[in-house]
Amino acid sequence: MKHEDSGVVFDIQHYSLHDGPGVRSTIFFKGCPLACRWCSNPESQSRHPQLMFYRNLCIGCGACAVVCPNQAVTLDEEGVHMRRDLCQACGRCVPVCLQNARALSGRVMTVDEACDEVRQHWRIFMQSGGGVTCGGGEALAQPGFLLSVLARLHGELGFHTCLDTSGCAPWDVLREMLPQLDLILLDIKHMESFRHKEATGLGNEPILRNARELGRIGFPVLIRLPLIPGFNDTLENLRALGSFLAEVGLRKVEIMPYHEFGLTKYGALEKEYSRPSSTTPETERAVTVLRGCDLEVLVHGRRDEEENPMQQSECAEYKQ
């Protein structure tokens, strides 16, 4: 695979406690082959930079309309209006908005820029047993850039590296990343391909294939189940997932209960959010069923250091 010197990133967050062991920095790659209806980062789905407009913060000063080079913003007695068909996401309106009602999601970063930003926190990584996580969106959708970033962070700097992924990529692409990774956080959203496609836009075949291959070679994996009410919290799906994971030898699972933390982002992008008929997933049932399949199961948000299913000593066991 050819290394690439730059890619599109929509955020880099530091001091993360939920994207792998220890305290971590997380690089969020922009672009994803899936379009999950409940996605908490809808701005991650498109590969291209996007302007986010938080209308509730706008006071109608019109500064954005003055600087817009594409006439995508207009102002009248009813307030500010935005035409997304004209917006080129140049970002000129962002710094002039005194209310922070505008934000640009996505920027081209070089490998040097991304790695230099996270390496500033190396003391925290080393003291906490943490490192760097590459997520998204889907980092595997920018494989050349991802490989270059991992080679720098893991191969040259020696940081603990983790990939947070939907697994929706060819096995050959994922396999090439493994020598530069210590841990994979792998989402499995549904065991039935047609139901998976219904909610995400694509079937689950490459995801299950990758899970099977990772189990076969014994790579450290933490399966993540985003638990969506009425979608994948049914007894039938939970049993199918538990049986599959036991069969392929992936025995560590983290349940991610449904939330609506990203709801305001849909409004900022003028996208529709598909809310489940219920917002209370069957979390305890999921724990019981999966533990009944002899799996190690935790619920996101309940984890402490003693319960962490993937300490670095475990992650370091695999060497290709």
Image (tube, helix red, strand yellow):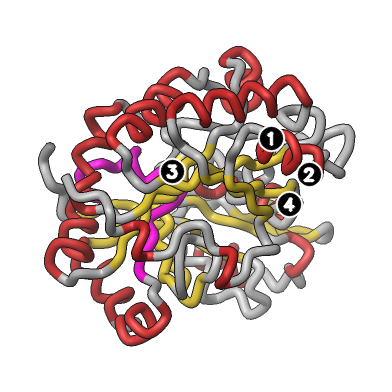
| Disc 4: which residue | 263
Q: Characterize the local packing of mark 2: few (<14), some (14-19) or many (20 or more) Cα atoms within 10 angstroms.
A: some
Placement of the N terminus among the 4 image quadrants: top left
| Disc 3: which residue | 165
Region in magenta: 131-146
* Circle 1: element type: loop
Question: Which comes before the other along the chain, label 1 or label 3?
Answer: 3
Whole-percent x and y of residue 289?
Answer: 73, 34
Q: Are marks 2 and 4 in contact (CB under 8 Å)?
A: no
Look at the image and say whether residue 139 sits in the magenta stretch.
Answer: yes
| Disc 2: which residue | 283
Question: Which comes before the other along the chain, label 2 or label 4?
Answer: 4
Whole-percent x and y of residue 56?
Answer: 78, 64
Look at the image and say whether residue 114 sits in the magenta stretch.
Answer: no
Label 3 amino acid?
A: Thr
Q: CA distance from mark 1 to mark 3?
A: 26 Å
Quarter-of-image position of residue 310:
bottom left
Residue 244, relative to residue 319: is it above or below?
above
Q: Are marks 3 and 2 in contact (CB under 8 Å)?
A: no
Query: Which of the two marks, 4 or 1, is nearer to us in this view?
Result: 1
| Disc 1: which residue | 292
Q: CA distance from mark 1 to mark 2?
A: 14 Å
Front-lying residue, 296 or 271:
296
**Residue 30 shows up from this direction:** no
Q: Is residue 140 left or right of residue 172?
A: right
Q: CA distance from mark 3 to mark 4?
A: 21 Å
Q: CA distance from mark 3 to mark 2?
A: 22 Å
